[in-house]
Amino acid sequence: MSMNTVEHARDVVVIGSGPAGLTAAIYAARANLHPLVIEGSAPNLPGGQLMITSEVENFPGFAQGIQGPELMEQMRKQAVRVGAEFLTENVTEVNLENRPFKIETSGGLTVYAKTAIITTGASAKWLGIPSETALYGKGVSACATCDGFFFRNREVLVIGGGDTALEEAIFLSRMASKVTIIHRRDALRGSQIMQKRALENPKIEFRWNSAVLEVHDPSHGKVTGVTLANLLDGTTSFLPADGVFIAIGHTPNTKLFAGQVDMDPHGYITTTPGRPLTSVPGVFAAGDVQDTLYKQAITAAGSGCQAAMEAAHFLEDHGE
């Protein structure tokens, strides 16, 4: 790959390969900018969070729904077909102080980029227990908007007590027969208006001062309930349920860019409202890495399109 010298800097380098990164790659390739996508490799799954999502029914254009990994495979093939190049490595270091930007990879490559599009996404925070991992996509989810539809007239649990948890619970109450919020404390952390809505919702119940010890039942290949610990007296109990939604927040994958682009207190890259511009000219951010509000595949794809178009304009403006 001819990019190991400053003279051979790529027009566009996309870091990340979820819906935002692949859409950016498609648009940049069609603008004849020969983008390079550094897509990640294990343990950072190329394809992003959709790689651990089973059925996707809310991405337009798929009347019958589509499996998350298949959707990402189709996007990647499309990017390759229109001319994007892929590097299956992780980015280990970036220097965004001067253009062209310098990007180091896990395979020892140095890549120079005239513009960079950051689409490294976010990772849902999980409880970190083996039974939860075993039931990912089999009743355990971190996205009510994605998966709530599959729990119509079923009983579900939401773990958490902040705005994320309350939003998920309220959304799920439209479909589920019953939603129980499990919270470690005896009071909610969410905003007053969200608390009021949740507390007044007849379908939502609360288990206070409680933590999930175990999700049942991996041996059945589906969720049947959870073992709860009462954090006040140490007693345990079984709570039956058909689905468990983990809503303890997301962590943006931005450690790599700390101190180089402006971020909010939670580590999300800050962008110009309505545009994917970061604090560094020529560096753009799209998808969940900068989206604290929507976090959907379709909104990530839309912002990836915007980032590629902005990169093209930036290169034109700089006579490149």
Image (tube, grey):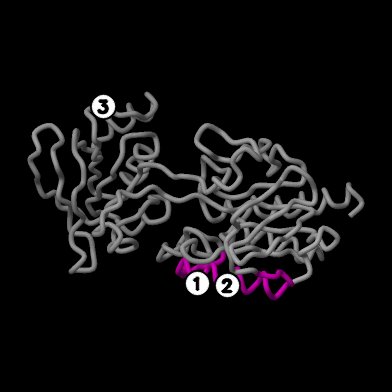
How many C-alpha atoms fall within 10 Å of the one at disc 3: few (<14), some, or many (≥20)?
A: few
Q: Amino acid at mark 1?
A: Glu
Q: Which image quadrant: the C terminus?
A: bottom right
Mark positioned earlier in the residue sequence (2 or 3): 2
Q: Would residue 140 be counted in the magenta stretch?
A: no
Q: Which residue is mark 3?
A: 187
Element at badge 3? loop
- Relative horizontal placement of residue 134, taking residue 4 as reference (left or right): left
Q: Amino acid at mark 3?
A: Ala
How many C-alpha atoms fall within 10 Å of the one at disc 1: few (<14), some, or many (≥20)?
A: some
Residue 74 badge: 2
Bounds of the magenta segment: 61-86
Element at badge 1? helix
Q: Position of residue 265 (x, y in %)?
A: 52, 32
Q: Is residue 53 above or below residue 290?
A: below
Q: Position of residue 172 (x, y in %)?
A: 33, 46
Mark positioned earlier in the residue sequence (1 or 3): 1
Mark 2 touching mark 1, by CB under 8 A? yes
Mark 1 touching mark 3, by CB under 8 A? no
Q: Which residue is mark 1?
A: 70
- Relative horizontal placement of residue 6, taking residue 39 as reference (left or right): right
Q: Residue at x 33, y 61 (%)?
A: 136
Q: Residue at x 14, y 42 (%)?
A: 229
Q: Which image quadrant: the N terminus?
A: bottom right
